[in-house]
Image (cartoon, rainbow, N blue to C red):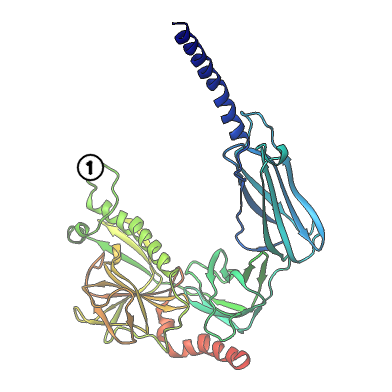
């Protein structure tokens, strides 16, 4: 009995020791953890401009951060950007830290050229004689505080309200974006047409609401974020647009409204005229937004050649830029602008592709009904709407004159016709210009030939 009692006592003592020793050893092991801190430097570009914010993310999920040091090194000179110790207390211990460093090389006395961005981090591990695990990360960067050079090569830019233009320019260095601003509308330039990849074409559009005093200029932003704005010679010719009245009847509403889908927030069904106004405004805008999104997908392939085709043997029933006033029972219910040209021929006439290109969209496009959109490259696209039949598929390459569908009355069309439109990037332009071989030669091709003669 005494032996058993002693054994039980020793067992309890041993178990108690284990209860004390194991947590102690577990504590020691955890304090001597060997995992280094994690460092991430999120650079949009390896080039640093006159002033740039750089996010640095540092984490240590086990023992927490002890110290972080960030510096910029160039030509043997070191500039400290960040140097901070963090408290040890468990409650205050930092495990995930996002540091936003504003780097202004000139203020730091750093000249342009290659440099190193270095980050050093230590945690609260007891390794390295209680100095903790350390992590280093270096990024090779290029300090560039000089704006890019932008030289306009094309001459004499004449553009009408609702019309299109072309600027050809050359950049001194690679840029993250460049193009033409028409006030706050941006039209990106595209390389690839010329052998010199520093030469860009920028088709731009003057929306119908733009006036002769509209500011147009070239802009370029290099990889370091430095920006250059360059002016060029241009002249805007004003144009007066037609005003038209469209009568909406109950017969038309009963015929057309069932096929259009609009967002209705009311529990009770809307009157047909209110559905029409909703479609003619909000759905129209959603359709325009879709068209603009498609314009962003235009490729740097110059597909088209020569004047664009018009629907054969057709009569114009509505023009580009017509200001329309919609009346129902004698009262004005809506006002919109017609941003294409309506062409009518015999019912279900075959519709040819206006020029070479790639089909970028086929399907129902709200108020425009069955629609085909063709990308002609470099931000120039054509649109064919109200079709009764579509005969091409998306991503299909088509030739000028190839039949892509047949005229119809889908969407808000009140009779069989083709709504033909052209747009640059995200802005509709007057198709009449693109039907005119002389206009294309004088305003587009002559500029390209002139630059080719010098730079090719």
Residue at image point 48% right, 75% down: 239
Viewer-side residue, 33 vs 417? 33
Residue at image point 48% right, 13% down: 7
Q: Is residue 287 left or right of residue 216?
A: left
Viewer-side residue, 101 vs 338? 101
User: From the viewer's perspective, is residue 255 above or below residue 149?
Assistant: above
Q: Is residue 21 left or right of residue 401?
A: right
User: From the viewer's perspective, is residue 117 above or below residue 165?
Assistant: above
Expressed as whole percent of the image width and height from the top left, the position of residue 444 reads 51, 85
Viewer-side residue, 237 vs 205? 205
Expressed as whole percent of the image width and height from the top left, the position of residue 350 reads 23, 82
Q: Is residue 271 left or right of residue 33?
A: left
Expressed as whole percent of the image width and height from the top left, the position of residue 268 reads 22, 42
User: From the viewer's perspective, is residue 47 above or below residue 389?
Assistant: above
The image shows a total of numbered marks equal to 1
Label 1 packing within 10 angstroms: few (<14), some (14-19), many (20+): few
Q: In the rendered image, which residue does mark 1 sit on?
A: 268
Using the rendered view, name the quadrant where residue 27 is placed.
top right
Quadrant of the frame with the C terminus: bottom right
Using the rendered view, name the quadrant where residue 246 is placed.
bottom left
Task: Determine whether the residue tagged by mark 1 lies in a helix, strand or loop.
Answer: loop
Residue at image point 47% right, 69% down: 208
Q: Is residue 123 left or right of residue 422?
A: right
Expressed as whole percent of the image width and height from the top left, the position of residue 23 reads 56, 26
Quadrant of the frame with the N terminus: top left
- Residue 108 appearing in the image: no
- Residue 391 appearing in the image: yes
Going by the picture, which residue comes out furthest to the top? 1
């Amino acid at each position: 009995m005494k032996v058993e009692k002693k054994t039980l006592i020793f067992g309890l003592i041993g178990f108690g020791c284990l209860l004390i020793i194991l947590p102690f050893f577990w504590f020691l092991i955890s304090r001597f953890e060997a995992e280094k801190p994690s460092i991430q430097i999120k650079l949009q570009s390896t080039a640093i401009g006159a002033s740039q914010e750089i996010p640095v993310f540092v984490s240590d999920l086990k023992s927490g951060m002890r110290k972080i040091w960030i510096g910029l090194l160039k030509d043997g000179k070191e500039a400290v950007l960040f140097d901070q110790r963090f408290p040890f207390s468990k409650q205050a211990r930092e495990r995930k830290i996002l540091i936003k460093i504003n780097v202004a090389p000139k203020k730091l006395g750093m000249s342009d050229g290659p440099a190193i961005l270095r980050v050093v981090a230590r945690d609260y591990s007891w390794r390295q004689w209680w100095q903790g695990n350390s992590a280093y990360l270096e990024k090779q960067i290029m300090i560039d505080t000089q704006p890019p050079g932008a030289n306009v090569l094309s001459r004499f830019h004449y553009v009408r309200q609702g019309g299109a233009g072309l600027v050809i320019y050359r950049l001194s260095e690679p840029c993250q974006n460049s193009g033409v601003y028409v006030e706050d509308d941006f039209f990106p330039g595209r390389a690839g047409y010329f052998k010199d990849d520093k030469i860009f074409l920028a088709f731009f559009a003057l929306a119908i609401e733009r006036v002769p005093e509209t500011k147009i200029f070239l802009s370029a932003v290099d990889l370091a974020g430095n920006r250059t704005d360059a002016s060029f010679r241009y002249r805007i010719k004003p144009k007066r647009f037609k005003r038209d009245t469209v009568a909406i009847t109950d017969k038309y509403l009963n015929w057309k409204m069932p096929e259009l889908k609009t967002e209705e927030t009311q529990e009770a069904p809307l009157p047909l005229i209110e559905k029409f106004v909703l479609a003619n405004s909000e759905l129209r805008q959603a359709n325009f937004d879709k068209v603009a999104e498609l314009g962003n997908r235009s490729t740097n392939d110059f597909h088209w050649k020569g004047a664009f085709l018009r629907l054969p043997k057709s009569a114009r029933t509505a023009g580009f830029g017509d200001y329309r006033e919609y009346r129902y029972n004698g009262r004005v219910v809506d006002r919109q602008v017609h941003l294409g040209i309506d062409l009518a021929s015999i019912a279900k006439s075959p519709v040819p592709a206006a020029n070479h290109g790639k089909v970028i969209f086929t399907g129902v496009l709200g108020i425009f009904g069955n629609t085909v959109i063709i990308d002609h490259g470099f931000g120039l696209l054509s649109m064919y709407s109200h079709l009764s039949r579509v005969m091409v598929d998306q991503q299909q390459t088509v030739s000028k004159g190839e039949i892509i569908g047949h005229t119809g009355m889908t969407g808000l069309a009140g009779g069989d016709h083709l709504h033909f439109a052209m747009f640059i990037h995200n802005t509709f332009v007057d198709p009449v210009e693109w039907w005119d071989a002389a206009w294309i030669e004088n305003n587009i091709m002559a500029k390209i030939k002139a630059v080719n003669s010098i730079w090719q």
